[in-house]
Amino acid sequence: MFGRERIEYKTPEQVLLMRRAGLVVAEALAAVRERAVAGVTTAQLDVVAAEVIGDRHATASFLGYEGYPATLCVSVNDEVVHGIPGPRVLEPGDVVSVDCGAIVEGWHGDSAITIVLDGAEPEDVALAETTERAMWAGIAALAGAERLGAVGEAVEDVVDAAEAAGLNGGQRYGLVEEYVGHGIGTAMHQPPDVPNFRTRDRGPRVRAGLCVAVEPMVVRGQRFTQVLDDDWTVVTGDGSRAPHWEHTVAVLEDGIWVLTAPDGGAERLAALGVTVAPLA
């Protein structure tokens, strides 16, 4: 059923199907995390994810999407999102963002992690951790939000606090604005948009059946980006590094559930004062 904003609100049964897709994504990313070390190519990581998704009788969301040629997006260092896996060999200190989607019985799950390889600069480690904290803060805000804009406010607050604490060596962080979170369900990208920053528009009302992907991207320099000649890979304009974290989240009658987290987000959300709702 669509609301006036043409948002696809899910039934509890549909949320359970999305949970199945989310768990496939979580398993694929866990397998990729284990293999992501210096000396491995990004194409090899793509094979790992494809095997997990195939073994679970699911379908990769990304492969063939508007012509995209791979199962994963693997974005390294100054690549923000949509990096195409290939012969690139990972090196010590690389910041590697891995985005994965899967489909089960027509329903999508979508999640991203950032892996910082051994030998990275402390500021790059702090950057990845800040971005992950910002994602969880945005998810936690969704639990009690009246409007979806609360997510972006919470994300920006975490980034501002990290900047004020000097975690970026006294420099400013940039919050990417061209690429935002999104609704998800029978399609990988649906209304509504989920900005990772404050906006004048408070966004649609948050109510049961809303399923969204929360995915902040924070850079060590300026927030501006550009797309490479492959028409996919997005890079920072100034060469700064840019982690990317993402989870698919369902709003239920009694709270939220993180569909792409094995524990539903219980551990990380508990630390933020949020208890996940029962998933029927």
Image: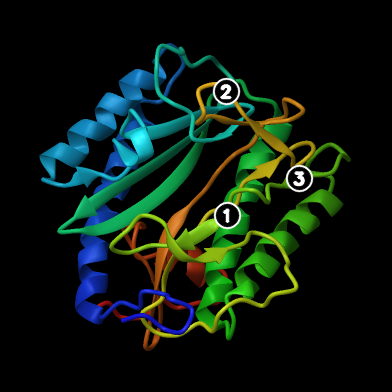
Residue 269 visible to the viewer: yes
Q: CA distance from mark 1 to mark 2?
A: 24 Å
Q: Residue at x 36, y 42 (%)?
A: 100
Where 132 falls versus 100 (above or below)? below
Query: Disc 2 or 3, which lies upstream in sequence?
Result: 2
User: What element does badge 3 sit on?
Assistant: strand
Mark earlier in primary sequence (1, 2): 2
Q: What's the residue type where badge 3 is placed?
A: Gly
Query: What residue do we see at 78% from left, 43% from top?
Result: 167
The type of residue carrying mark 1 is Val
Q: What's the mark number on residue 94? A: 2
Marks 2 & 3, CB-CB < 8 Å contact: no
| CB atoms of marks 3 and 1 within 8 Å | no
Q: Which residue is mark 3?
A: 174
Number of callouts = 3
Q: Which residue is mark 1?
A: 180
Quadrant of res 278: bottom left
In the image, residue 261 lies at what x, y percent? 36, 58
In the visual, does 173 lie left or right of 279? Answer: right
Q: Quadrant of residue 169?
A: top right
Name the residue located 34 percent from the left edge and 25 percent from the top edge: 45
